[in-house]
Each structure stands twice: as structure tokens, then as C-alpha cells.
Image (cartoon, rainbow, N blue to C red):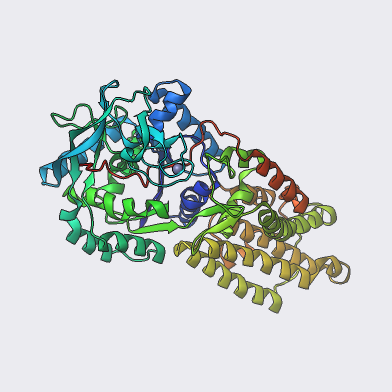
Amino acid sequence: MTRYLITSALPYINGVKHLGNLAGSLLPADIHARFRRQTGADTLFICATDEHGTPAELAAAEVGVDVATYCARQHEVQADIYRWLNLSFDYFGRSSSARSHALTQHFFARLDEHGFIEERTLWQIFSVADDRFLPDRYVIGTCPHCGSVRARGDQCEDCTRPLDPQDLLSPRSAISGATGLELRPTRHLFLRQSALEGELREWLSSRSGWPPLVRSIARKWLDEGIRDRCITRDLSWGVPVPKPGFEKKVFYVWFDAPIAYIAASQDWADVDPARRDWQSWWFEASDVRYLQFLGKDNVPFHAVSFPCTLLGSREPWKTVDVIKGVNWLTYEGGKFSTSAGRGIFLDQALNLMPADRWRWWLTAHAPESADTDFSFARFAADVDHDLADTFGNFVQRVLSFIVSRCDGIVPDGGAPGPEEARLTEEIARLTTELRAQHEALALRKTADAARAIWKAANLYLVSRAPWTLIKSDPAEAALVLRTAVNLIGIGARAAWPIIPDAADKALAAIGEREVIPTFPSADDLTRIPPERLIDHPGLLFEKLGPQWAETQHARFAGKEGESFAGRDDSSLNGAPCPRALS
Ligand SMILES: [Zn+2]
């Protein structure tokens, strides 16, 4: 039987993430992991914080703590938020763990042994006062385009134009402010990706089921000519390079970050080594199907760079079977922006309301074929319609009626007729559709299929009108109510991967408490027997309404321009290699 290995893109350590990070990788991965567990498949869901690199060092310096302490704290902050969001990681690790360091050095040694590592000389900015080479981001100065005085050597914060350090006017060190900067030659290590191009193409063409977006990004990278990648940096925070002459350098964060998927699985196994075998998931793991979930900016590193590391090691490591990548979530018509304080961060989202509504909206409107724009007005209208009026209302109507008219006992009597036969066919069709959409990793269509089940349940209830039948034909009314209770079970099982809190509450109310509710089928229409005592879960979803949306819109617009200390949605994804400046 196939086992499922699922990883979400690693959130960068530097501060609380925003809704876009949740929509792009964390949530889709969680939904798929929950679905696989529902179907009884052996599933391992791994994530970790990506902790190395310049932004972590700079952020730690800004708050005045050492970078290890900073990362430890930030990891806990993120882990708490993900627990609140009901992200069901089997393990949420750290790329700075001892396992991660050892495994990164292992991969480097194997790649070096097989001739895929090459030393090259680059010209880089050296700060005499700091006695060190400066990564691009550590050189600050005045932007030659817009005159901003807070431009960095890789990009201007204000006009967002990409820059080279030598473009800056009045350049100085971000560490000390020193202006004594000069170009000096320095040795770096390159991963010879070009030597692996043929193998990589072959590997890529052996993969199937990738969304067109992901496949085209991967092909573009290969067709534009795969470049050798510099995998060393002049930093102290990171995985040390185990090679003489490189004592002051560490590996580039993008070399070690994906290795943390494997290292976090080792850390997971270390918790209970007698029962957990990380190697069976990653090494000679032919019965494992490996799925990665990530935003489109991460595709090149997962479709090209990480496979190069794994293939070039000449060891039988598991490579990814399917990469699910998505477009961007935008905010009220523009970009999420940390520096401009624009957008909703996950701690703010959870302060507004618990996880389910966020999870539902970001699934039902996932940025799959194009970017999706979040607005409070659309959000409130959509979740009110789907969760309060459709799913919540059905649960509410059926259970209040049984509690008030049948003493909370699922009534006995009646026999299924043609309407129930039609309903059975409909539920069989819809649950098959739901499963197919999960398997296709189609987020919006998965939400559509769940919603279709809730709608079918509402239609059945309205057409059979047990509140009228109970006067004329109590046995028939009993049959309809019993079927409706079972429809709650089916609707909640269908909803569980997306809105686990509400689904668990609804299932508990009808006496179906399960840690992992099984995937629904038409057989579940007769699952709950007569005479079972049920309860009322209370209102599952109160309506938000347009007024709420207007209030939030105004409130968040007023926050724009505020500084969000410790929050940084910038990532190293686009960070270029140190360039030859000569
Ligand atoms: Zn500028």
C-alpha cells in the first residue's frame, strides 16, 4: 500500500507569516495530509522553520540578541500559531538542528566526492573595519534611482528596484556603519548543476501530475540554461563548510534548507526510535509517494536545485513525485507588504477569529490558476454563505428539531423510498468527486465538492420537510430525520480536512467522536442507528455580515504604515549568488 510523504515549504524564521504563506503551502499541505489519513493511508507530514541566512542575523542584531536565541524564540512563536491554525504536522522541526547540520555536510561530502563541487574566485565587498566580506544585504547606502537612504545592496526597500552593492551611493557596512569598503577576491564553492542537466531533464520528464504552472517554471529554468550555483556565504550563522580554507564561510541557506525536510524527519524519528523509521520514508523508499506544497517562487529550488543535490549524491534518496505550487494571494488589490505594514498577519488573523473561516476561504479561493485577491467584503460574504448559511444552518436546523421534538433521540421508524435512493446515488457521486479532487490536489474544487454535499443535504431536507411530515406521517418523518443526522456526519467528514474544528464539533454532537474521522461514502447514510442520543453543538458559525467587513477594512487600512517589528515576509528565494564584480 502506498505511503504518503508530505512537506510544506519551510517558513522563514524571521517573524510571523501572513495569510499568503498560509494559503500557498502550509494549508494545502495540511489538507492533503488530513485527507490521506482519513483514507487510512500511512502518512508523514513534515515542516520546519528555515533559520539560516542574512535576514535572521540582521533581525537578531536589531532586537539585540544573539541569532541562536532569536531563532529559538521565533520558532516557538511560529509553532504556537500553527497549532492554533490546526496544522497537523507530524513534526515541526528546525533547519538549525544538529541533524540538519550533519546531513547538509554529508550531502556536501558526497557531491564533492563525485566531482560536483568546484572552487571559484569571486570579487566581493570587504569591510576593512569589520574585517569580513559583506553579503549584498549587509551593504547599505543611497539608492541611485529614487534617492532613498535605506537601500540595501540587493534591492531598494522603497522603489523595490534590484541593485548591485556597487550601485549604491555612499555605501557603508550594515554591521558597523563603516565606509571603508573595497572589492577583494574570495574563494567560493559552486554546485555544478550544469553537469547534472541531462539527468535532471530525464528525472523531470519521469514526473507526472504537476500543475501546468509548476511544470512551466521548471522547464523555463532548464531551457534558459541551468547555472552552476554558489553554495557558500560569508556568514557565521549557518552550517559550517567542512573544507580547509572555508572556515569563515557557511553553506548558502538555499543549499541546506530543503535538506531540513529529511533532517526534520530524522528529528521526528529520534523522539520514538523504536517505532519511527525515518529511513523507510526517504531512503530506497519505492512505496512512498512524496508531495511538496509551495508557492511559485519556491519552484526552481525544489524542481531543480534540491533534486541536483539528491541525484548528485549518488545515493538512493527519495525525490519528489509531485510539486503542488500556487500563485500569490494579494491583499485588497495590492501586495502583502511587511515594510508597508500591509495585509493580515497570522497572529492578527487568529485574534479576529479562530482558524476554520480562514482555512475555508483560503481553500475555496486558493490562488491556483491565477492570483487571488483577499478583501474583507468578499471574505465575509463567502464564509457567511458557505459556512453559516449552508453547512452551519443544516446542522443547526436538524439538531435543534431533534432536541426539541424528539428529546434528542434519533427517531426510529420508516423505510427508505425513492427519494432516499436518489439521495444515495447523489452522495455516492459527490463523495467520489470529493476524493478525486483531493487526489488531484485541486483545492478550489475540493471545497466546491464539500459545498455540493452540504447543498444536497439542504435540498433533501427542504424537499422532505420533516416539520410538516411529523404531523401527517411520523414514521416517514423519523426516516427523514435519521437520514438528515447521517447527512450531518457525511457533511462533517467531507469538511474535516478543511475546517477540522467545526467538523469535530458536529461529529461529536451526533456521537461520532473520532480522532481521524473516516472519509465519507454513501454507506454512511445509514451509519448512525435509531435511538442514539444526540446533542446540540451550539451555533457553529455566527454570521459576520457586511458591517463587520467594513469595520475591519477601515481598521486595517488605518494600520498601514505602522511598523511591524519582528515581522518580515521577505524571503531569500530571489537572493542571487555573490556576483563576480570584476
Ligand atoms: Zn530606490
On the image, the x and y values in percent for residue 545 come to: 76, 53
Work out which quarter of the rendered image holds the C terminus and state it: top left
The quarter of the image that holds ligand 1 is top left
557 to the left or right of 311: right
Residue 464 rendering spot, x and y as whole percentages: 77, 71
Q: Percent from the top left, x then y, of residue 114?
A: 11, 46
Residue 133 higher or lower than 428, as above or below:
above
Is residue 537 positioned above or below 424 on the image? above
Residue drawn at 64 percent across, 39 percent down: 559
**Residue 47 location, quadrant:** top left
Count of labels shown?
0
Front residue of 576/390: it is 576
Q: Residue furthest right?
A: 471
Q: Is residue 534 visible?
A: no
Q: Quadrant of residue 13?
A: top left
Camera-nearest residue between 271 and 86: 86
Seen in the picture, residue 259 relative to 130 is either above or below; the reply is below
Image quarter (top left, top right, bottom left or bottom right) of the N terminus: bottom left
| Image coordinates for residue 229, horizontal then vertical, percent | 23, 47
Image position of 545 with respect to 572: above or below:
below
Identify which residue, 257 or 453, lies in the foreground: 257
Residue found at x 76% / y 60%: 411
Q: For residue 201, say whether it is visible.
A: yes
Query: Can you tell which quarter of the image residue 344 is in?
Result: top right
